[in-house]
Amino acid sequence: MVATMAYTRHYESTTSGLNFDRFVDRFDEPALDKMRQQYWTAKQLIRKKLGKKEDEHLLASDAEFDTKISLFQFVQETSDQLLCCVDDYQHYLSELVQVEFKLSKMLKENGGAEATAAGRIMIAVARVLALSVHHMLLLKLGNFL
């Protein structure tokens, strides 16, 4: 008794499962690789139609290959998610820079109008915020270089 496979084969996951799109041209593969793939796909279909059991070594090889493909797809999806997170980080950093710059500008203007110690403190805080904005811009631009 042969147990049914719980995974999807590469052919089944990359096509609609219909016969006509088995031989869709893929221009990024050499001709020999395409011919080998078509040969093994046709051989598998013929064996299945005739009701013959597949070779257990071939099944093990397919399982290993399918595992590697699924691992690659997982790494690719995770990398895409990480890239989205980095893009979000860059966006929020830009917003923070703009808000801190506006705050430092406002503190400097209001501190200049104030003649007391509070005015001097506001100007000092404005300078520190401007320096912070400068460092964040360097951090943001450093990621693009």
Image (tube, rainbow, N blue to C red):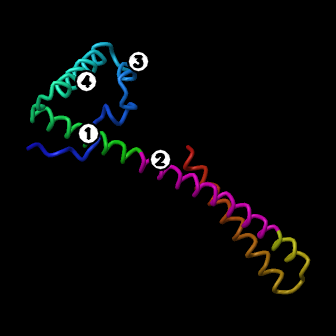
Residue 27 is one of the magenta-drawn residues:
no
Indicate which label's residue lies in the foreground, 4 or 3.
Answer: 4
Q: Quadrant of residue 46?
A: top left
Whichever of callouts 2 and 4 sits on the residue coming sooner in the sequence is: 4
Mark 2 residue type: Asp
What span is colored magenta in the figure?
77-105
Q: Determine the main secondary structure of the stretch shown in magenta.
A: helix
Q: State the residue at coordinates (69%, 71%).
A: 128
* Inter-mark Cα distance, 4 to 3: 15 Å
User: Viewer-nearest of labels 3 and 2?
Assistant: 3
**Callout 3: few (<14), some (14-19), or many (20+) C-alpha neighbours within 10 Å?**
few
Q: Which residue is mark 2?
A: 80
Q: Reply yes or no: does residue 83 show up in magenta.
A: yes
Q: Earlier in the sequence, mark 3 or mark 1?
A: 3
Q: Amino acid at mark 1?
A: Asp
Q: Which of pointers 2 and 4 indicates the residue nearer the eye?
A: 4
Q: Nearer the viewer, mark 1 or mark 4?
A: 4
Q: Nearer the viewer, residue 43 or 58?
A: 43
Q: Are marks 2 and 1 in contact (CB under 8 Å)?
A: no
Task: Check disc 4 and give the amino acid type.
Answer: Thr
Q: Is residue 87 left or right of residue 34?
A: right
Q: Which mark is residue 25?
A: 3
Contact, CB < 8 Å: mark 1 with mark 4? Answer: no
How far apart are the two marked residues, 1 and 4, measured between alpha carbons? 15 Å
Q: Residue furthest bottom?
A: 117
Q: Amino acid at mark 3?
A: Asp
Which residue is tagged 4?
41
The residue to which callout 1 is attached is 66
Residue 21 in the image, given as x and y percentages of width and height: 39, 23
